Image (cartoon, helix red, strand yellow):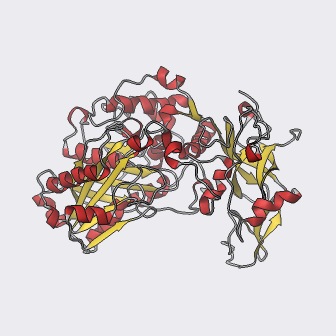
């Protein structure tokens, strides 16, 4: 397949992927998990740690107030693996969700480094120990400033409520109902049953979904992703390395990470859309490929409503049409015309903050997804985020 | 579904609607830019930042008008009327100050399109809430902060 990618993307490939043990409350040390995924990804790329000269992790060490949300930072990883780095980066904002993929591509394409190791480690399931994020957040003593001051006095403390705002508009404007979100959740649970690394693998029925307790209307328990433990790593390399990888390298066809207009979650001009739409628009502006070229989609589902929103944002269906596109879920199933979130997504595989989706896209493109392998996997799209951050990543088989 | 009363939370551990003792709402740290917004309720006024040069309203408040770049931005009283942009009835107990369920909404003020703020809808039946419904401001005092809340227009105080 001839590349139509912009110059930046043409210079970069995904050369390796790695994954630690993943699951729920596995009680493994965060650094140990990180080492497992990093060494797996480096070996998978046909490299040794001494070859790695770039490093990205998000958010970094001691950055997030939520226990288990972040893993070790760049310095700790560099020390542990004795890396020697030409470039490294961590931080809460610019690298959010899958933003590191864009940063790594820029670093490699610009010649700052040749092989960037990207790693995302979470131990939220263990850290929360069943108490939920409110337990991990603590009591938030003192008064709040900055962006949080507009939310905390109103008990607006979870992205569940903010995603619910978006869902309420889809319900009101386009006639979406809980059955659409239920079809997303049920489909993903079915996929997770075929994924040994998933947190939830027992079947979920539409009745189970409809009877679940409300979290923030119209979103119920099964509309929210599940905390997980584990680490996922990826190596992004200069395109000259593409012929030297043990597994097929994956081409980066197009990237998008735009945030246009107002930045705060609640200030988006059209609350039905959110930043996925900006990222997707930028991604499509960087390639001659079109939505018709996409064989499968791995899109961020921190909350189920993000999945239909991403399908619309990416042009995989029209505005307001995700309700009919998803229907009873058959079209987005593994056997459907557009398989979606084939690993179970964050709703069932677990909340790896976008990295489980990216890992799964790589497996599918390599034909290594086992029982979950979709029929045709030449081109896949990955969406990260969905609220006031978003990244769109179009991947294809290399060559 | 139960009706949501105005006293979503009560200051200083008072009894909320469900009879439970609750800590006060988390409060904002008052500063140069937000003080008028968070304290205008002491006089029953909803105060929003406005550019003195071009008349543009901005929220959250800040030091410069994003429309004309004038630095002459100051708080001015608005009508306190608006419409519901979107909402959610939150059932999850994220914080002990809040009796569940409670409504977290985005309200757009009548003064300007998309002049939008996060708030709670009170004095309402959640089953009757609709996007686009008219609402008006009311305030809940906690210490030195007067938190702007909204209720459906026409509801008795």
- Residue A375 quadrant: top left
Residue occupying image coordinates x 41% and y 41%: A227
Residue B45 at x, y percent in the picture: 85, 58
Q: How many marks?
A: 0
Q: Is residue A296 left or right of residue A84?
A: right
Q: Is residue A326 visible?
A: yes
* Depth check, front residue: A102 or A130: A130
Q: Is residue A287 visible?
A: no
Q: Is residue A347 left or right of residue B101?
A: left
Q: Is residue A384 left or right of residue A78?
A: right
Residue B146 at x, y percent in the picture: 79, 55
> Compared with residue A101, is residue A169 higher up or lower down, i.e. above or below?
above
- Residue A48 quadrant: bottom left
> Compared with residue A75, is residue A111 higher up or lower down, i.e. above or below?
below
Residue A238 at x, y percent in the picture: 20, 66
* Quadrant, the C terminus of chain B: top right
Name the outermost residue toward the top. A207
* Quadrant, the N terminus of chain B: top right
Residue occupying image coordinates x 43% and y 22%: A205
Q: Is residue A144 left or right of residue A325?
A: right
């Amino acid at each position: 397949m001839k590349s139509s990618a912009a110059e930046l993307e043409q210079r970069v490939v995904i050369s390796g992927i790695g994954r630690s043990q993943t699951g729920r409350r596995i009680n493994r040390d965060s650094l140990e998990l990180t080492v497992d995924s990093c060494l797996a990804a480096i070996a998978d790329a046909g490299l040794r740690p001494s070859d790695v000269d770039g490093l990205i992790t998000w958010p970094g060490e001691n950055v997030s107030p939520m226990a288990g949300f972040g893993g070790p930072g760049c310095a700790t990883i560099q020390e542990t693996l004795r890396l020697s780095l030409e470039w490294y980066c961590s931080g809460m904002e610019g690298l959010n969700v899958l933003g590191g993929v864009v940063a790594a591509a820029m670093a490699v394409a610009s010649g700052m480094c040749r092989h960037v190791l990207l790693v995302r480690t979470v131990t939220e399931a263990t850290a929360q120990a069943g108490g939920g994020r409110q337990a991990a957040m603590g009591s938030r003593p003192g008064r709040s400033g900055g962006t949080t001051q507009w939310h905390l006095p109103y008990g607006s403390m979870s992205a569940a409520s903010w995603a619910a705002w978006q869902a309420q508009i889809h319900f009101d404007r386009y006639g979406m109902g809980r059955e659409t979100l239920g079809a997303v959740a049920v489909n993903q649970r079915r996929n997770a049953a075929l994924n040994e690394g998933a947190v939830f693998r027992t079947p979920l029925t539409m009745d189970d979904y409809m009877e679940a307790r409300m979290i923030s209307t119209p979103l119920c328990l099964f509309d929210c992703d599940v905390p997980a433990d584990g680490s996922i790593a990826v190596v992004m390399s200069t395109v000259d390395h593409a012929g030297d990888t043990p597994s097929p390298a994956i081409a980066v066809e197009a990237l998008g990470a735009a945030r246009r207009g107002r930045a705060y979650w609640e200030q988006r001009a059209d609350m039905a859309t959110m930043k996925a739409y900006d990222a997707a628009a930028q991604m499509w502006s960087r390639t001659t490929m079109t939505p018709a070229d996409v064989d499968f989609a791995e899109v961020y589902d921190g909350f189920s409503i993000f999945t239909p929103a991403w399908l619309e944002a990416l042009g995989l269906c029209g505005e307001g049409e995700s309700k009919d596109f998803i229907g009873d879920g058959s079209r987005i199933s593994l056997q459907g015309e557009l398989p979606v979130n084939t690993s179970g997504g964050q709703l069932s595989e677990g909340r790896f903050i976008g990295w489980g989706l990216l890992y799964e896209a790589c497996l599918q493109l390599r034909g290594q997804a086992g029982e979950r392998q979709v029929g045709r996997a030449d081109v896949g799209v990955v969406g990260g985020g969905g609220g006031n951050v978003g990244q769109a990543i179009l991947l294809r088989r290399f060559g | 579904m139960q009706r949501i009363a105005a006293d979503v939370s009560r200051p200083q551990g008072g009894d909320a609607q469900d009879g439970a003792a609750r800590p006060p709402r988390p409060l904002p740290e008052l500063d140069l830019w937000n003080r008028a917004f968070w304290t205008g309720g002491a006089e029953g006024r909803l105060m929003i930042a406005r550019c003195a040069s071009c008349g543009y309203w901005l929220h959250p408040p800040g030091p410069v008008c994003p429309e004309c770049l004038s630095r002459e931005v100051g708080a001015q009283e608005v009508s306190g009327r608006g419409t519901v942009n979107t909402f959610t009835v939150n059932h999850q107990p994220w914080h002990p100050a809040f009796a569940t369920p409670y409504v977290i909404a985005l309200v757009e003020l009548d003064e300007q399109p998309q002049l939008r703020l996060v708030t709670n809808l009170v004095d309402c039946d959640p089953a009757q809430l609709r996007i686009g419904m008219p609402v008006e401001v009311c305030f809940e005092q906690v210490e030195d902060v007067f938190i702007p809340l909204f209720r459906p227009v026409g509801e008795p105080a």
